[in-house]
Image (tube, grey):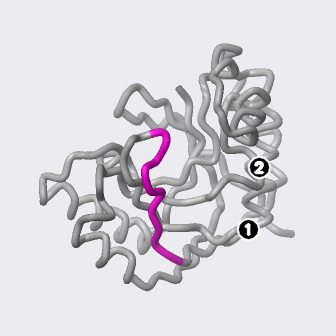
Amino acid sequence: MIGIFLEPNKQLKKIIIKWKKNLKKKNIKGKFINHPPHSTIFLANIRNKKKLFSVLEKNIANFNQFKITINKTSVFKNDLFTGGDTIYLNIKKNKKLLLLQKKISNNLIPLVDKKSKDVKFKNNLLDRSQKKYGFPFVGNHWIPHFTIGSVKNFIEMNDYKIFRKLKINLKNEINKISIWEIIGNKHIKLKEIKLGTKN
């Protein structure tokens, strides 16, 4: 499985790691807690890694750097994919980020393993995206975010109230993407690709 990620700046990374550590300290079992801090732009089984790098380098070299705003804490309650409550920091909707995701996803269609596209969803938007890209969250229905973890019944815990009250308003410069190989819970960074700079 290959993931294409945005990585947080130091200030944002600190907050994410603090909350991950908080869950670990309390021995709260969950998913994604040990994953490196990131926001997923695209995730699929890719057939040819070497070609992946050249396709991405060619297609995002002229995509200018931009800023995102992380504007609140939130939770995907009873997350369909994890069976828990997925705790995250929300990225304010951003046209450039949506364009970047679309550009990456469209260019990777020929490299996505066909079996990835056979997964079925009851939700039409997710299903259409999965069939076309091999990833269910491409398009306006995508909720960009930095995940902290996914914990069963988190919304019933005291930590939930503390998390929801957290005021957050951070800017993060997006000047690169990173490409990761994911094997179970193990994440191996393969490459970083810089975005273009404004002239």
Which stretch did the figure color magenta? 72-81
- The percent coordinates of residue 173 (x first, y second) are 62, 70
Q: Which mark is residue 24?
A: none
Residue at position x 41%, y 26% in the image? 183
Disc 1 residue type? Asn
Task: Decide if residue 114 is on the left or right side of residue 168.
Answer: right
- The percent coordinates of residue 111 (x first, y second) are 73, 21
Task: Decide if residue 32 is on the left or right side of residue 48.
Answer: left
As for residue 78 lying within the magenta part, the answer is yes
Disc 2 residue type? Gly
Which of 127 and 137 lies nearest the eye of the viewer? 127
Disc 1 packing (10 Å; few <14; some 14–19; many ≥20):
few
Q: Which residue is mark 1?
A: 94
Residue at position x 60%, y 42% in the image? 4
Mark in front: 2 vs 1: 2
Which of the marked residues, 2 or 1, is nearer the chain's N terminus? 1
Res. 174 image quadrant:
bottom right
Which of 150 and 48 lies nearest the eye of the viewer? 150
